[in-house]
């Protein structure tokens, strides 16, 4: 008998539950509390971005999305996208001021983020994240952590070396798009071990359709958000340069 | 605002005697039969554009032949076989030999002047790329005369193009001929990227860069990311055709759709690759034509970058009809609309600029208005075919032919002609004829619309593309006759332009006129050395803001008014703020790049007709010529002390490390390499997904025992370590030990890669049996290419050390080899992981 995944048993429509894990909620609250003093001198925009990023982080981990992602691969992808494309850039923008002059290395976070993203979407490691809570958290921590590092580095570099930042951003967008493409175009379901037909069927999706939806979320809206963030970053850098 | 003339100018008058004469001597071009040795981008750019226009006319003539064939139903003028060759060659030549090279030509011609650089950093590379393209392209085109032209459509989809259905050399002409012209496009892109980032005038920050430079930066960046996919696809298809490695053969675990993904991953960005520079030109021409600054400069720059990003995600919308998952169609349909946003921003910026100024009825303005009209119509039909159900109806009909020609002619040809008329005074010293230009515009505008508008209708009536005739009595006759009549009118328009060029275009080498009163730096007085002195820039239109600037520049009152070393030089500035960093010595005329180009073109074309020994000879000539050019023309060392460029600025004439443009070029090249490797990994992943776990590896095939690849990985890692070890030895000046370390690195690398290959072979794995083996040996092929390059580089490096040309200061050659080495070692390890760990990790 396999262990029950961290986010609970696969739900059916109408039965998705919030995640009341007290340890997680306490951790998130403590993290938010620890961040407060660092933000005291930041402007209203950065405070707002941090708060919003933190709220999205909480939402992704505590909301019924956690439970839903036990049933649907596409929900898990949505959860990841919230973490790496919404929460991480907001927090990176909010917590890390533009005034620091030290230009960080871009290749390392970009490569590690790519590695984390691809590794956790291989069938084996993906299924393992259902089997053990520790692996579930390793997955989220490595994805969110490398994404945060990458966005922070991109933010730094955008002011010091926008060419290098644009390059790393484009490379990341391309590799994420490629992974989404492979998941979308795969002619067979890869994650049957955890998303069996009986698990996805109540949601009106076959495992293959669920997987295609997940791949498409990563490929298309993920790519659009990525492009929008990078173009917005360029706009900010240009405005600052012309001021 | 601190205009350039606010403070004292960097260099006082009068200028010393002989300063200008020395500058002219350094930049004097070769005459007579030595003309091909010239490398100055101002000359290469004109030649490049002229050759691209020649291909435009040639491919246009092929189109005219097709229109004649289709003018009446049941015509037997041209058989289906020749017709297939005509449309394939027409599309291929227009895309690969006209559109992309024409834009690169405009880039290498205009950018130095626009950035007030003496030249871009690697003029000999551009010249090499030009000659390789011109020679290879002409030979490729001539294949149509002896019936050997490719005939599988410009996108060459297998299985139609596999050996089984295309047994002749026709497809090979495409794969090898075009494959290597893509390499020349990448060479041009490297020159453009580094030129834009490192050769801008002092003070020309990214936010003060002309929009054309933004467009070319995005253009070149997209080439770096998009072209590798088609190069990799080309390699795979040629390996399948030549050696029967089944990448695209379904019966042996391959998948023909793999080609389409690789092709359209390139093919979709390609549309923007040729549109973005055209949009950039429009954004440059329009402000001059209407006497108003461009509306929304920042937004337009962001739109260019945004389009570049978006275009990489959308390739699947060329594949609606291939049976991809139905769910994905709606996503891509929606996402296709997203591209309309950045394009719309630019269109509104242009319309707003026109509204703010007072348009003048000059020829470039006419062509810009024509561009807006035709391109918007093409965009509207683009929105129609982005709707999936409509696309399924219109797919493979003349509706698509109409759509793509409206987009490409509107979006690229009209702006290019506008640019031709706008910038012709720059090299020629006088404008082209307004009367002939206006005539040409009306002929083209009417002709293009008359050719392609009826195709919407014949297409909707069901007339398929790529079919050499149609039966009478289906209502198609009238529309086809109109199209043919339009094509003749459009051809007359092109003939008028050619006549105008013949009569009025002579390269007089920069008389320095500014007939339209433009505001950007390319209209400064020019010599063969470009601008006499390089001004500090503080606005987007320096010539509008400081009318005294041209005369100051001409008299040499700004930076670097002469040659500091007696050689050709260009000022290198920092990538963001454009602060002067050093004076780079750049090469002058020589034969090496011409011989290298002949060798490269000969190598690929001999392979096409399977003359392997001839190919090897050509290849050896090419490599020898390149090595000669590297040996004599690069890494000159600190041949003199710092030089004074004026304004109290003293700059070195030689740098190493991260600021050296040579390191940047190597870095960009490695990005190209990395993208090809990503395509290689995509190939593994895609074939595994298609084949299923049970086919990866297939039954009866076993991977070698992990011990062998583990040993190979250790050897490769040790090779990287040995190369790192050479660096401290260099710093301490131990040449002998350094040679040992470098040779050890080479031996370890070759042993490591060889051990891996041997283990695979001895485990019984063969490339022909199944796509699993084919993918693994394609990986080996790619690593082998790097091993060969690493061998040549190492031996060259050892020879340089032996000749005493490398020391702790003069070390650019070593630094570049080391950078390549780090990449090669990491790529080899990643390749081994893909071969050995990926199939094993699937069940983990």
Image (cartoon, rainbow, N blue to C red):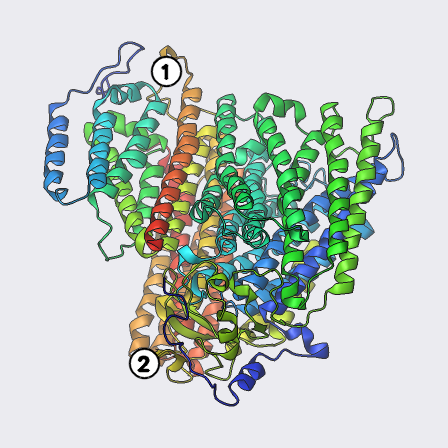
Q: Secondary structure at mark 2?
A: loop
Q: How much space separates mark 2 and mark 1, taking CA atoms?
A: 67 Å
The residue sitting at 57% across, 78% down in the picture is B27
Q: Secondary structure at mark 1?
A: helix
- Quick one: quadrant of the N terminus of chain B? bottom left
Using the rendered image, report if marks 2 and 1 lie on a common chain: no
Residue B758 locus on image (x, y percent): 47, 53
B695 or B654: nearer the eye? B654
Among all residues in the image, which is located at the extreme front? B358
B351 or B335: nearer the eye? B351
Q: Is residue B47 above or below residue A124?
A: below
Taking the image as shown, residue B22 lies to the left or right of residue A146, namely: right
The residue sitting at 31% across, 48% down in the picture is A154
The residue tagged 1 is: A200
Q: Tell me whether circle 2 and circle 1 mark residues in contact (CB < 8 Å).
A: no
The residue tagged 2 is: B733
Residue A132 locus on image (x, y percent): 21, 27
Taking the image as shown, residue A148 lies to the left or right of residue B394, namely: left
Residue B231 locus on image (x, y percent): 56, 49
Taking the image as shown, residue B679 lies to the left or right of residue B607, namely: left
């Amino acid at each position: 008998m396999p262990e029950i995944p961290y986010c609970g048993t696969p739900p059916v429509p109408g039965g998705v539950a919030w995640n009341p894990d007290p340890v997680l909620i306490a951790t998130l609250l403590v993290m938010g509390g620890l961040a407060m003093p660092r933000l005291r001198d930041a402007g209203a925009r950065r405070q707002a971005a941090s708060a919003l990023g933190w709220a999205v982080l909480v939402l992704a981990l505590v909301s019924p999305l956690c439970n839903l992602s036990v049933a649907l691969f596409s929900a898990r992808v949505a959860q990841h996208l919230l973490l790496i494309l919404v929460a991480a850039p907001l927090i990176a923008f909010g917590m890390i001021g533009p005034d620091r002059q030290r230009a960080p290395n871009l290749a390392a976070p970009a490569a590690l983020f790519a590695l984390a993203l691809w590794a956790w979407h291989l069938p084996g490691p993906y299924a393992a994240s259902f089997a053990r809570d520790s692996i579930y958290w390793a997955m989220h921590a490595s994805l969110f952590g490398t994404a945060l590092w990458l966005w922070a580095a991109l933010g730094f570099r955008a002011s010091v070396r926008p060419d290098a930042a644009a390059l790393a951003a484009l490379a990341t967008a391309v590799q994420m798009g490629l992974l989404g493409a492979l998941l979308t175009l795969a002619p067979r379901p890869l994650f049957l071990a955890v998303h069996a037909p009986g698990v996805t069927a109540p949601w009106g999706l076959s495992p293959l359709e669920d997987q295609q939806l997940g791949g498409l979320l990563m490929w298309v809206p993920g790519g659009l958000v990525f492009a929008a963030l990078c173009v917005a970053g360029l706009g900010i850098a240009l405005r600052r340069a012309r001021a | 605002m601190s205009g350039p003339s606010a403070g004292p100018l960097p260099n006082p008058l009068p200028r010393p005697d002989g300063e200008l004469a020395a500058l002219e001597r350094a930049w004097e071009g070769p005459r007579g039969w030595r003309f091909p040795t010239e490398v100055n981008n101002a000359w290469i750019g004109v030649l490049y554009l002229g050759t691209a226009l020649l291909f435009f006319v040639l491919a246009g003539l092929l189109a005219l032949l097709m229109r004649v064939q289709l003018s009446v139903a049941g015509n037997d003028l041209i058989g289906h076989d020749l017709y297939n060759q005509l449309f394939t060659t027409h599309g291929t030549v227009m895309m690969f030999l006209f559109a992309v090279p024409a834009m690169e030509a405009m880039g290498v011609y205009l950018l130095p002047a626009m950035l007030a650089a003496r030249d871009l950093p690697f003029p000999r590379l551009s010249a090499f790329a030009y000659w390789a393209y011109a020679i290879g392209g002409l030979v490729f085109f001539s294949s149509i005369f002896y019936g050997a032209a490719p005939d599988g459509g410009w996108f060459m989809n297998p299985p139609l193009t596999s050996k089984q259905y295309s047994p002749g050399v026709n497809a090979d002409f495409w794969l090898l001929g075009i494959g290597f012209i893509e390499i020349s496009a990448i060479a041009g892109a490297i020159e453009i990227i580094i030129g834009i980032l490192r050769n801008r005038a002092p003070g020309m920050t990214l936010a003060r860069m002309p929009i054309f430079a933004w467009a070319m930066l995005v253009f070149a960046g997209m080439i770096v990311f998009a072209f590798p996919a088609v190069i990799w696809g080309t390699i795979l298809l040629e390996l399948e055709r030549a050696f029967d490695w089944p990448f695209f053969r379904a019966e042996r675990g391959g998948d023909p759709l793999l080609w389409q993904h690789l092709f359209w991953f390139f093919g979709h960005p390609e549309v923007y690759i040729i549109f973005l520079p055209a949009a950039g030109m429009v954004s440059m021409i329009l402000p001059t034509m209407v006497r108003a600054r461009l509306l929304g400069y920042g937004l337009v720059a962001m739109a260019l970058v945004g389009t570049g990003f978006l275009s990489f995600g959308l390739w699947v919308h060329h594949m609606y009809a291939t049976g991809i998952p139905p769910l994905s169609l709606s996503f891509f349909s929606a996402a296709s609309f997203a591209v309309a946003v950045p394009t719309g921003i630019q269109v509104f910026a242009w319309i707003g600029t026109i509204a703010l100024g007072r348009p003048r009825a000059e020829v470039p303005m006419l062509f810009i208005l024509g561009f807006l009209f035709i391109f918007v119509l093409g965009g509207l039909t683009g929105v129609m075919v982005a709707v999936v159900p409509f696309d399924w109806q219109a797919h493979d009909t003349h509706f698509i032919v109409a759509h793509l020609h409206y987009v490409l002619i509107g979006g690229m040809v009209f702006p290019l002609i506008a640019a031709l008329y706008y910038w012709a005074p720059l090299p020629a010293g006088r404008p082209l004829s307004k009367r002939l230009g206006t005539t040409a515009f009306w002929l083209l505008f009417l002709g293009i619309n008359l050719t392609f508008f009826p195709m919407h209708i014949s297409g909707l009536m069901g007339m398929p593309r790529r079919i050499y005739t149609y039966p009478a009595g289906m209502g198609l006759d009238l529309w086809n006759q109109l199209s043919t009549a339009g094509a003749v009118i459009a051809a007359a328009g092109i003939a008028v332009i050619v006549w105008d060029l013949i009569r009025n275009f002579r390269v007089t080498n920069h008389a320095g006129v500014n007939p339209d009163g433009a505001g950007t730096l390319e209209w400064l007085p020019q010599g063969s050395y470009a601008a006499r002195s390089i001004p500090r820039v503080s606005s987007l239109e320096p010539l509008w803001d400081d009318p005294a600037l041209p005369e100051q520049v001409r008299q040499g009152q700004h930076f670097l008014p002469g040659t500091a070393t007696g050689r050709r030089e260009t000022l290198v500035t920092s990538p963001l703020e454009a602060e002067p960093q050093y004076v780079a010595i750049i090469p002058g005329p020589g034969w090496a790049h011409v011989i290298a180009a002949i060798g490269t073109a000969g190598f690929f074309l001999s392979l096409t007709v399977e003359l392997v020994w001839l190919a090897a000879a050509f290849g050896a000539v090419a490599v020898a010529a390149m090595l000669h050019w590297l040996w004599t023309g690069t890494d000159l060392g600190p041949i003199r002390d710092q030089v004074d460029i004026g304004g109290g600025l003293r700059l070195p004439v030689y740098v190493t490390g991260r600021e050296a443009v040579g390191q940047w070029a190597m870095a960009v090249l490695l990005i190209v390499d990395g993208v090809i490797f990503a395509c290689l990994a995509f190939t593994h992943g895609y074939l595994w997904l298609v084949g299923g776990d049970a086919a990866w590896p297939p039954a009866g095939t076993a991977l070698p025992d992990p011990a062998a690849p583990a040993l190979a990985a250790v050897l490769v890692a040790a090779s990287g370590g040995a190369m790192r070890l050479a660096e401290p030895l260099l710093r301490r000046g131990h040449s002998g030990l350094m040679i040992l370390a470098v040779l050890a690195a080479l031996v370890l690398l070759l042993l490591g890669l060889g051990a891996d290959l041997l283990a695979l072979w001895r485990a019984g794995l063969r490339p022909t049996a199944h796509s699993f083996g084919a993918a693994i040996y394609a990986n080996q092929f790619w690593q082998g290419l790097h091993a060969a390059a690493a061998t040549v580089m190492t031996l060259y490096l050892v020879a340089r050390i032996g000749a005493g040309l490398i020391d702790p200061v003069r070390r650019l050659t070593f630094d570049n080899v080391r950078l390549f080495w780090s990449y090669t070692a990491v790529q080899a390890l990643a390749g081994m992981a893909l071969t050995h760990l990926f199939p094993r990790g699937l069940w983990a």
